[in-house]
Image: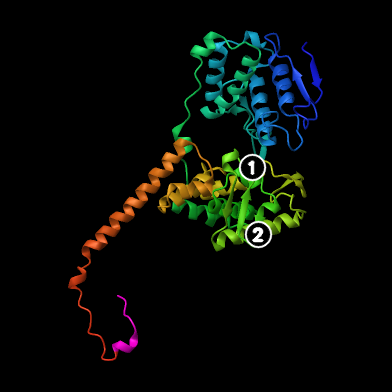
């Protein structure tokens, strides 16, 4: 079995406490190689360490999820035994939700439930297909391991093809009527308040789910009415930015979230706006709410509103789309929303240009029905008009 060694800090990297380095070879089993690689990437560095020697906590969490999913298929495989056919088989099984990706979607699916005095059988395990982008992200980890172990063959280099991303996945956003319906439903019940406040702030700031969950109290300045998206919570360095809080509804919703955070023990500037829940009734303001923290009530609002497809991340797409529909120039939108992919930029530019064109056409029609300035008959000035100062028409 491969052994891991601890390298002592060198003079060229004085701020790195220690770093595990493991020899990953073709003989390494996938699980061992993947977890060893993760340990080498997740060593925390002190301030001042050079970039590239560690990964952010959010990235680490994502990588570990990908590895757990890959283990369902590749556990027991040696890296040197993995061939092109295995990657293609993984793509097909993951895309369709075939074995080994048939599982309990929710814990309650494993046991029967009682409804109106009648026992309903357990739903059981069901296929769990995912979008192409997720599959590409997961296999991206495997690709790294194969390259690290010098197992990336000519066959893989020439014939492995990542799946094409679903275009429709990128463009989903609420229309104005659906947005109003979502907020109207979310405000109906007290237990849905958090979804209601969260949605208003997300619609008003163009922030993503990770950016909102990563907000600390010190990032919010209600006096200046701005919120700062820190580099470490943004998806990438280009998304770090300062956003102005505009609109009475956004300011009100942010005040409600701040009040809730205080009630849950968040008082320090480094405490999170959305404290993480340790267990029922107890929260830890030093940790952020997990990605599943809103799921229960979010899904209830989705069911009640009929907008079953609407995800938390779609709030960002919806917010940017509203700005584009208002004819806001794309550069102004991007300064508020931060970096987006080139595909998304083209999409929002198209909406913005279409809205501006519609406004210009309306303006021209209005101009054509107006009489010429020379044909407008103004009433004669009063006799004492000289004492009234200049007149403006």
Q: Where is residue 218 in the image (x, y as percent from the top left)?
A: 70, 53
How many marks overall?
2
At a point 64% along the width and 62% down the height, the residue shown is 223
Q: In which quarter of the image is the C terminus?
A: bottom left
Observer-nearest of 116 and 389: 389
Image quadrant in which you'd find residue 29: top right
- Residue 391 forms part of the magenta stretch: yes
At a point 30% along the width and 87% down the height, the residue shown is 386
Residue 6 is left or right of residue 192, and the answer is right
Identify the mark nearer the N-term, 1 or 2: 1
Q: Where is residue 267 in the image (x, y as percent from the top left)?
A: 76, 55
At a point 55% along the width and 46% down the height, the residue shown is 302
Q: Position of residue 385 (x, y in %)?
A: 29, 87
Q: In which quarter of the image is the N terminus?
A: top right
Q: Position of residue 380 (x, y in %)?
A: 22, 84
Magenta-drawn segment: 385-393
Residue carrying label 2: 256
At a point 48% along the width and 49% down the height, the residue shown is 333
Residue 175 at least partly seen: no
The residue furthest bottom is 383
Please tell me whether residue 229 is drawn above or below residue 16 in the rendered image: below
Distance from the alpha carbon under mark 1 to that under mark 2: 25 Å
């Amino acid at each position: 079995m491969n052994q891991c060694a601890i390298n002592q800090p060198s003079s060229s990297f004085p701020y790195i406490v220690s770093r595990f380095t493991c020899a990953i070879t073709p003989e390494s089993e996938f699980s061992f190689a993947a977890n060893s690689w993760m340990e080498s990437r997740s060593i925390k560095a002190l301030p001042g360490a050079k970039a590239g020697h560690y990964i952010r906590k959010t990235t680490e969490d994502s990588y570990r999820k990908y590895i757990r999913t890959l283990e369902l298929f590749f556990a027991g495989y040696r890296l040197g035994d993995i061939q092109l056919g295995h990657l293609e088989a993984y793509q097909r099984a993951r895309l369709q939700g075939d074995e080994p990706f048939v599982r309990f979607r929710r814990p309650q699916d494993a046991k029967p439930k009682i409804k109106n005095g009648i026992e309903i059988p357990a739903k059981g395990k069901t296929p769990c297909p995912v979008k192409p982008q997720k599959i590409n992200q997961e296999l991206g980890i495997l690709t790294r391991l194969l390259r690290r172990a010098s197992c990336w063959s000519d066959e893989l280099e020439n014939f492995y093809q990542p799946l094409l991303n679903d275009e429709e996945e990128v463009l989903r956003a609420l229309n104005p009527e659906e947005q109003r319906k979502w907020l109207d439903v979310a405000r109906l019940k007290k237990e849905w308040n958090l979804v209601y406040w969260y949605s208003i702030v997300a619609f008003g700031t163009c922030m993503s789910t990770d950016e909102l969950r990563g907000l600390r109290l010190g990032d919010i300045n209600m006096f200046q009415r701005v919120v700062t998206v820190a580099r470490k919570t943004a998806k990438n360095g280009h998304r770090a930015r300062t956003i102005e809080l505009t609109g009475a509804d956004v300011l009100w919703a942010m005040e409600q979230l701040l009040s809730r955070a205080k009630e849950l023990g968040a008082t320090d500037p480094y405490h999170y706006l959305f404290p993480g829940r340790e267990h029922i009734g107890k929260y830890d303001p030093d940790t952020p709410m997990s990605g599943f923290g809103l799921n229960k009530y979010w899904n209830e609002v989705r069911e009640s509103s009929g907008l079953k497809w609407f995800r938390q991340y779609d709030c960002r797409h919806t917010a940017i789309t509203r700005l584009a529909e208002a004819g806001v120039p794309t550069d102004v939108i991007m300064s508020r929303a931060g970096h987006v992919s080139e595909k998304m930029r083209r999409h929002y530019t198209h909406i913005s240009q279409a809205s501006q064109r519609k406004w210009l056409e309306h303006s021209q029609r209005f101009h054509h029905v107006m009489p010429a300035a020379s044909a407008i008959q103004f009433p004669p000035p009063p006799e004492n008009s000289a004492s009234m100062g200049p007149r403006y028409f």
